[in-house]
Amino acid sequence: MRKPSILVLYTGGTIGMMKDPKTGSLVPFDFGNIYEHMPVLRNLDYVIDFYSFENLIDSSNMTPEFWIELAEKIEENYEKYDGFVVLHGSDTMAYSASALSFMLENLAKPVVFTGSQLPMGMVRSDGRENFVTSIEIAASKINGMPCAPEVCIFFENQLLRGNRATKFNAENFNAFSSGNYPTLADVGIKIKYNREFIAKPNEGKLIVHKKFDRNVGILKLFPGITHDFVKHALGTPGLKGIIMETFGSGNAPTSEWFLDELADAIRKGLIIYNVTQCKSGSVEMGRYETSLNLDKIGVISGYDITTESALAKMMYLLGEGFSRSDIKKYLQTSLRGEMTV
Ligand code: ASP
């Protein structure tokens, strides 16, 4: 029988670092020698190939252009491999995983993002476990079908849907949460897949979308927000879409100036997407008076989508050049399992 084959794509981040034995400082790991550093990989009996991007980055420097490069590498190698593991810094991993989920339409193979809080080359690193388990997940099949044919994030002991995840802890090994969607798999002695929550492999041909519009923004509301601040944010030249992070179930101030600014911006063509600041729960426009007004002036509900996913979705929909009414419709539709409507 053919061995499972996995392509590991290394973008940078803590996971790929090790201490230089000579200088003692952290330097990028040479994945060409991976079997030397991690002989345990041989036990998996897979074909594991590596591709390292030329410009390895701390994920705080991630850009839509890099997302496109990453998606293109997956596209180029899609037929050749059973699954993909993306080594990525944890800081913006949820944004990248969300973006890739929108880019890879009809995905039928696992794309598992992973990283670590401590560099792979450190004694107590969480990187080795995360790396080995991600490879195992990317290769796992049941009855010939991949167990997790989605863009996902594996960290510590949980497999999460990528466009549902958020980095919530800068210190713990368990760094990600998915407040509105169950884990896709829980990892202990065994990898327990929660099949009812995992997407079925798509049957259509993979379509890779490669356009993002960066004319978007995030406006986080807070008590005491000034008129000037809102006016300037909404009036940013060229701005087409904004993710408005509201309170609780989608609530915002009822002050006249605030609603007038929003209504005016919407009239001029801005798309305003209502996403909650809470890590769990959903926007419910109209539940309180403080959100009923937003509904009336044409703010769009993001239901239980994460900010990371909302941003990637807005960039993707605007980039694709859909009509305004289609964008509004798609923002309220779950395209890749990113929201519960
Ligand atoms: N700053 C690093 C990054 O996101 C942290 C990490 O790798 O987890 O690239």
Image (spheres, rainbow, N blue to C red):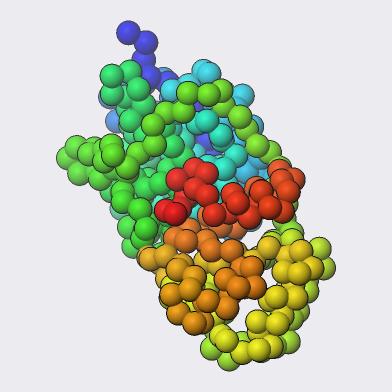
Q: Residue furthest front?
A: 296
Relative to the observer, which residue lies in front, 158 or 163? 163
Seen at 49% across and 48% down, the residue is: 334
Where is residue 120 shown, x and y percent of the image?
40, 46
> Which quarter of the rendered picture does the C terminus lie within?
bottom left
User: Is 228 positioned to the left or the right of 194 in the image?
Assistant: right
User: Is 30 positioned to the left or the right of 264 in the image?
Assistant: left
User: Is 31 positioned to the left or the right of 159 in the image?
Assistant: right
> Which quarter of the rendered picture does the N terminus lie within?
top left
Q: Is residue 20 visible?
A: no
**Quadrant of res 51:** top right
Q: Is residue 3 visible?
A: yes
Where is residue 192 shown, x and y percent of the image?
22, 39
Q: Is residue 127 above or below residue 260?
A: above
Seen at 56% across and 23% down, the residue is: 205
Q: Residue furthest top?
A: 1
Relative to the observer, which residue lies in front, 148 or 137? 148
Q: Is residue 317 above or below residue 200?
A: below
- Give the number of marks: 0
Where is residue 24 shown, x and y percent of the image?
47, 54
Q: Residue furthest left?
A: 189
Relative to the observer, which residue lies in front, 148 or 246? 246
Seen at 72% across and 69% down, the residue is: 266
Q: Is residue 133 above or below residue 269?
A: above
Seen at 33% across and 18% down, the residue is: 144
Where is residue 44 shown, x and y percent of the image?
30, 25
Q: Is residue 99 above or below residue 110?
A: below
Relative to the observer, which residue lies in front, 333 or 11? 333
